[in-house]
Amino acid sequence: MTTMLDLNETPLRDVNAALQATAGMQPNTAFEIVNPRGSHALAVGLNAPISVRIKGSTGYYCAGMNQHANVIVQGSVGPGVAENMMSGTVVVEGDASQYAGATGHGGLLVVRGNASSRCGISMKGIDIVVQGSIGHMSAFMAQKGNLVVLGDAGDALGDSLYEARLFVRGSVASLGTDCVEKEMLPEHVDLLRDLLARAEVEADPSEFRRYGSARTLYNFHIDNAQAY
Amino acid sequence: MKDNDTPRTLPRQSATFTREVNAEIRRAAATGIYDIRGGGAKRRVPHFDDLLFLGASISRYPLEGYRERCDTAVTLGTRFAAKPLELAIPITIAGMSFGSLSGPAKEALGRGATLAGTSTTTGDGGMTEEERGHSEKLVYQYLPSRYGMNPDDLRRADAIEIVVGQGAKPGGGGMLLGQKITDRVAGMRDLPVGIDQRSACRHPDWTGPDDLEIKILELREITGWEKPIYIKIGGARPYYDTALAVKAGADVVVLDGMQGGTAATQDVFIEHVGQPTLACIRPAVRALQELGMHRKVQLVVSGGIRTGADVAKALALGADAVSIGTAALIALGDNDPRWEAEYNELGTTAGAYDDWHEGRDPAGITTQDPSLMARLDPVAAGRRLRNYLNVLTLEAQTIARACGKSHVHNLEPEDLCALTVEAAAMAGVPLAGTDWIPGRGGY
């Protein structure tokens, strides 16, 4: 059964409260949200394996801090979609603004369109798949998880990267400090194939290049001062 | 006259190139790197010591000590939060990270705060079970690094403090050096063991007050509009930052002056960026008053609070509460002379030890070394903190009664005078013996 929530008639607080009240419910609970009209902080703090379909575009922090829920946005999203996500899946059928998946600890974020700058900033375990391109300073200080880009990456990709893995099929405008291209080993091809399958994206893993941390800045050394 | 009878000038140390300055030049020349340390500004700056209370007189009658009530309770978060924080005393424990501090030290802070009826605060690195379990009221810091940040901890916090800046380093991030990164610390922060962990200087997913307003909306929506939202600012531009925090929707503003401590940052940053606590309070209060939000958005002041007199002076200048960090650590046992021999081995002395980032704290507080950590008994240390908080409260009450106040919040600038022109100007109170407030009345 699908519950319809209309933001033209129901305040944001009540919509989020209804979604959040599902904590502990069964996985087949489903919601459809209409008339989001760019609302900020929509479908945030969910904590159950429910399905939420948002029919339209949203503002900041859509599906922020998601746990377990499967959220689909049939539109574009503002800054910070799925920020600090812990688990579950968030799919954006349009484009995403800045900071998509920022600081995410887990789960899967899929952007069918493009993602703007700082995609995956400070990511801590989340997997992000962007079918289009990403903007500059993406994966800045990214700690854990995987960022997959089928299009191109902007300037300073992976600046000050930690242990996150970056896979880009198109061009990279420039790499950030301490980010280097690394060999695609069979284990990485397998990992990428699995990520693409989970994101329901058709692509050949062998067409991607892998980028990661050179690990030269992990411990401060005065000789590296000019790198910062 | 023989040569050795000729009067000679005495060797004269330069007031500019002092022994300490020269030693730092030599250290810098030898290592090529700036000095990193913990704590707050050590230089002398105008402070609460430069203010005095006037006490009662013919026109103001005092209250009887031990007989007439002088209340100390404060409620933080009355603006929007459904569940504001009700504290027995106007003194809270400031945010300090697990990682920088040991688990037992965090537990001791929670125990002491709870016994005294007040709150303690997490820090960079997330919420530990020791801390949550022993803190009846726990404020959860929401920091740029988001280390250990998760919605479950957000929901089980009693308040949320969005950290924009801190007094020791307004505009600066942090660095937890690799030697303090144990398996547990690394696991909580999602980083490998043994590498330096940088804490970003600005938030990853918002910039500016308009974004901050939306970030606060998100945090409120996730926590059901129950929890007070604090915004912590460093003592950079207290008038504007306070006004912008109110505009963004804060329930509470935490204002940290340059004497406020840090776990580790560059000495040059600590000593040369930011304003003294005393200089920050009145501009912040003025911003609240102009917006009609004084006492509606509560102001918590930190940075160099040591005594009940400091507490009373901060409240008299318009704060609703104060917060202590360095003083709380000293109450637990930090820099205790009982460890003098070991401080000497580290090239320092009790009271001056500030290499907290190195993780070799003889007192077992700013360390992750199991043998050193074991030196701190969290139960006994918690009791010491409780005792100290009680003394601060009693001292503040003593002063408030002397000024004829039945609640410490009734203290006001008119109860104060200043010993120096600088303090008079910063605090907006008359220079002692005059009716002159520098900057007021056209002169």
Image: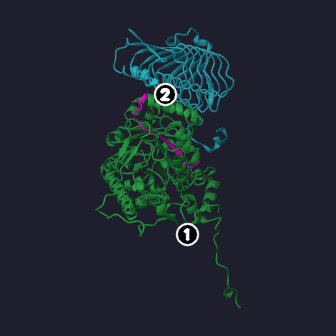
Q: Amino acid at mark 2?
A: Asn
Question: Residue at horizontal 36%, vertical 51%?
Answer: B89
- Say which element carries label 2: loop
Residue B233 highlighted magenta (yes or no): yes
The answer to whether any part of residue B303 appears in the image is yes
The quarter of the picture where residue A222 lies is: top right
The chain whose colour is cyan is A
Q: Chain of mark 1?
A: B
Work out whether residue A86 or residue B334 is closer to the camera in this orientation and state it. Answer: A86
Which mark is on residue B434?
A: 1
Q: Position of residue A144 (x, y in %)?
A: 51, 27
User: Of all residues shown, which one is farthest toward the bottom?
Assistant: B1
The chain whose colour is green is B
Q: Position of residue B192 (x, y in %)?
A: 49, 33
Give the Cα distance between marks 2 and 1.
Answer: 56 Å
Work out whether residue A67 or residue A146 is closer to the camera in this orientation and state it. Answer: A67
- The quadrant of the image that shows the C terminus of chain B is bottom right
Work out whether residue B47 or residue A142 is closer to the camera in this orientation and state it. Answer: B47
Mark 2: few/some/many CA within 10 Å (<14, 14-19, 20+)? many
Q: What is the magenta range?
A: B222-237
Residue B259 highlighted magenta (yes or no): no
The residue tagged 2 is A84
Which mark is on residue A128?
A: none
